[in-house]
Amino acid sequence: MKRYGNSFKEQALALLPGDANYDMCLTCGLCSSGCPATGLADMDPRKFLRMAALGMDEQLATTDWVWMCTMCQRCTHVCPMNIDIPKLVYHARTLWPREKRPKGIIGSCDVAMKTDTGSAMGARPEDFEFVVEDMLEEVKETQPEQADLSVSMNRTGAKFFLNQNSREPMTEPDEMVPLWKILNVVGADWTYSSVGWAAENYCMFAADEEAWEKIVRTKVKAVEDLNCEVWLNTE
Amino acid sequence: MTFTVQDPCQLVRKSLGDDVADDLRFVVKTVVGEENFIDMHPNRSNNYCCGGGGGALQGGYPEERREYGRIKFRQIEATGADYCITPCHNCHSQVHDITEHFGGAWHTVHLWTLICLSLGILGENERAYLGPDLAELGL
Ligand code: SF4
Ligand code: SF4
């Protein structure tokens, strides 16, 4: 039976599907023994889970460890009871006052929310268009065998919608080119979009659900607006 | 010259599973030659996270992030490979960082770099992460 209440455990339980229950933990320690975050901030996944089961809400809502766990799901993968510890970690992140959460993550989320590209580095649509065009021109000039290299921007009806981590256009644009070449060699029908192209989503890591959803919706809309069949996420 | 590969948690364990890990090995072996590939352990869905996920690269706990990555560092080191291929953006940043931090001898490269190198279409400015042994190849 699921109960919904105010304790950490009860709130976390509400997130679980079906009859899953954190009380099912066997305390076997498989999760902790294969978790690279074990021992950081004097915590490990089994301990975290036991503390939830024991109702140690205050400690769970304040331990820095939730920002050191990468939510990689290896613990869940090896757990004989299939207990989703990263979900619990995510929940603990939501309990932090927003202004107390890591500045880098929150900052990247805030920046991404300010532009309809979703870029955590603040790249605007015109920045992306400029960098891509500039880079393409340079390649064609300096690599004559790439004369037929093409990159579409905002092409409706392309099969693949390719997104791009902001780091490339903003800091190392040359690194975009190999992927273009590969797509060209295989004859892929693909396009970039000047909006919603950024692959990263720090609002998700920030556990800011409203912002997370808004970013995802912006990106989905960009794919739908161009009527593309497949959304290729390179992140 | 030998190569290993980091299975990205997001791509393998968290989304497409062992099938995509096998596809990844097919591509990597085709590109570098089967005899030059050394798998990391544990691997595929059982792989360890490099420590760059979950926002950790911007998380503000660099010391702990690197401590987390020390396990990955040792796993890469144990392969003895000259190159660690990272087919994920976060993995590339984190593995590159821990390699420098803990003094690894290998180079950390994107998969797209090696695919283009093997196709003979990798430009001069697209070689930032190759070691001196491959940097001039096919120019
Ligand atoms: S692996 Fe699962 S059952 Fe074992 S200690 Fe961890 S959470 Fe409990
Ligand atoms: S999800 Fe977190 S607790 Fe689980 S193995 Fe990964 S780092 Fe450890």
Image (cartoon, coloured by chain):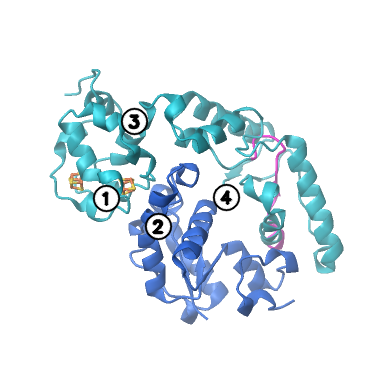
Occupied quadrant, residue A143: bottom right
Mark 1 vs mark 4, CA separation in Å: 32 Å
Position in image of residue B118 (x %, y %):
64, 73
- Residue A192 belongs to the span the image colors magenta: yes
Label disc, if present, on residue A207 of the rendered structure: none
Element carrying mark 1:
loop
- State which chain is coloured cyan: A
Instruction: Tell which circle, 1 or 4, labels the residue nearer the N-terminal end.
Output: 1
Label disc, if present, on residue A234 of the rendered structure: 4
Mark 2, other Cα within 10 Å: few <14 / some 14–19 / many ≥20: many
Tell me, yes or no, whether dots 1 and 4 are on the same chain.
yes
Check disc 2 and report the residue beneath it. B69
Mark 4 vs mark 3, CA separation in Å: 27 Å
Q: Is mark 3 within 8 Å of ligand 2?
A: no
- Mark 2, chain letter? B
Element carrying mark 2:
helix
Label disc, if present, on residue A39 of the rendered structure: 1
Give, as a three-letter code, the residue at label 3: His
Q: Colour of chain B?
A: blue
> Which of the pair B64/B5 is nearer the observer?
B64
Check disc 3 and report the residue beneath it. A91
Position in image of residue B137 (x %, y %):
68, 78
Mark 4, other Cα within 10 Å: few <14 / some 14–19 / many ≥20: some
The residue depicted at 84 percent of the width and 55 percent of the height is A137
Viewer-nearest of discs 2 and 3: 2
Viewer-nearest of discs 4 and 3: 3
